[in-house]
Image: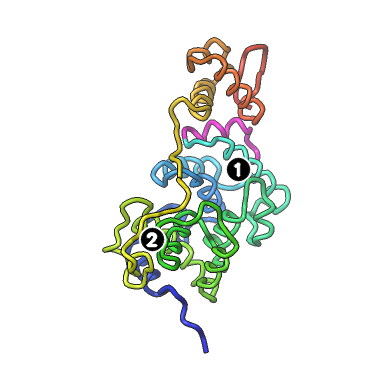
Amino acid sequence: MTQTPPIDHDAILAWYDDHARDLPWRGPAATPWSVLVSEFMLQQTPVARVIPVHAAWLERWPTPPELAGSATGDAVRMWGRLGYPRRALRLHATAVRITEDHEGQVPSLHADLLALPGVGDYTAAAVASFAFGQRHVVLDTNVRRVFARALAGQELPERQLSSAERALAARVLPEAPQRAAAWAVAVMELGALVCTATAPSCHRCPIRDDCAWFADGRPAYDGPPRLAQTWAGTDRQCRGRLLAVIRENDAPVPRDRLDLAWHEAVQRERCLRSLVTDGLVVEVARETFALP
């Protein structure tokens, strides 16, 4: 006898059919390359910021070989202000690997995806599911939050993904590959639009009546403190300022131009050297810097 899953697949899939956002990397017209690019860009970045950059990227480099044939500096410049610009370098390296090892086509096998530069377990599973309709456990922060609330009765998941959490996600994954792939994106969308980290809209949730957290009165998170990420004054902000000056100039930038971008000299020098070490910036002449 087939065991009834502890979460209503049909309710979430039906909700997704009615409420899914029309995003360019979804739907039958989206290429695997479009899906892969979106997954790189969406890491720690809101959808609204990704959409225009994703469109510009696909217009310029509609296939991996076209990106692979461009300079890494072009990728960094096109990345713009998405943040975490090392992702642009990794995506370029991935395009080179796809071009050299997979005849320019995004591979469909999870193991092959996982072997690409900058691709971890989540991204490999997401691309295999969303681009190729395969059955994989796809666990991003939105999915983990839905499962924590609906299945475990906790407001937020643990900070680190555990084997028990992965096993529970595998248990509720539908058996049929296409249904599993649809389920993966549907739960993700539910977490992004309804079961949000703050102010969740439980009155709009299709599984509210079966949610352990809602049934328990929505108890507050009582785990280890979660520190909010800071931005002002950090090395990340400093690196972003310096990189923006270099990115927005076609000619190499002398150091005195960079000195104007950040007031604290020791931090500025540290961040500039870290950009060089990461391969995002090159010193083309003494005290003069450019994109690679």
Residue at left offset 62%, top offset 50%: 119
| Residue neighbourhood size for the residue with mark 1, other residues' Cα within 10 Å, grouped as few (<14), some (14–19), many (≥20) | many
User: Disc 2 or disc 1, which is closer to the eye?
Assistant: 2
Give the image location of residue 247, x and y in percent: 53, 25
Q: Which colour scheme is used?
A: rainbow
First reached walking from the N terminus: tag 2 or tag 1: 1
**Helix, strand or loop at mark 2:** helix
- Quadrant of the rendering where the C terminus is positioned: top right
Residue 234 relative to residue 196: left or right: right
Residue 32 relative to residue 222: left or right: right
Label 2 – label 1 distance at C-alpha: 28 Å
**Helix, strand or loop at mark 1:** helix
The residue lying furthest to the left in this view is 203
Q: Which label number is shown at residue 91?
A: 1
Residue that carries the numbered disc 2 in the rendered image: 190
Residue at left offset 45%, top offset 75%: 6
The residue lying furthest to the bottom in this view is 1
**Up/down of 249 relative to 125, above or below:** above
**Up/down of 75 relative to 256, above or below:** below
Look at the image and give the residue range highlighted in magenta. Answer: 68-81
Residue at left offset 53%, top offset 36%: 84
The residue lying furthest to the top in this view is 256
Give the image location of residue 156, x and y in percent: 43, 56
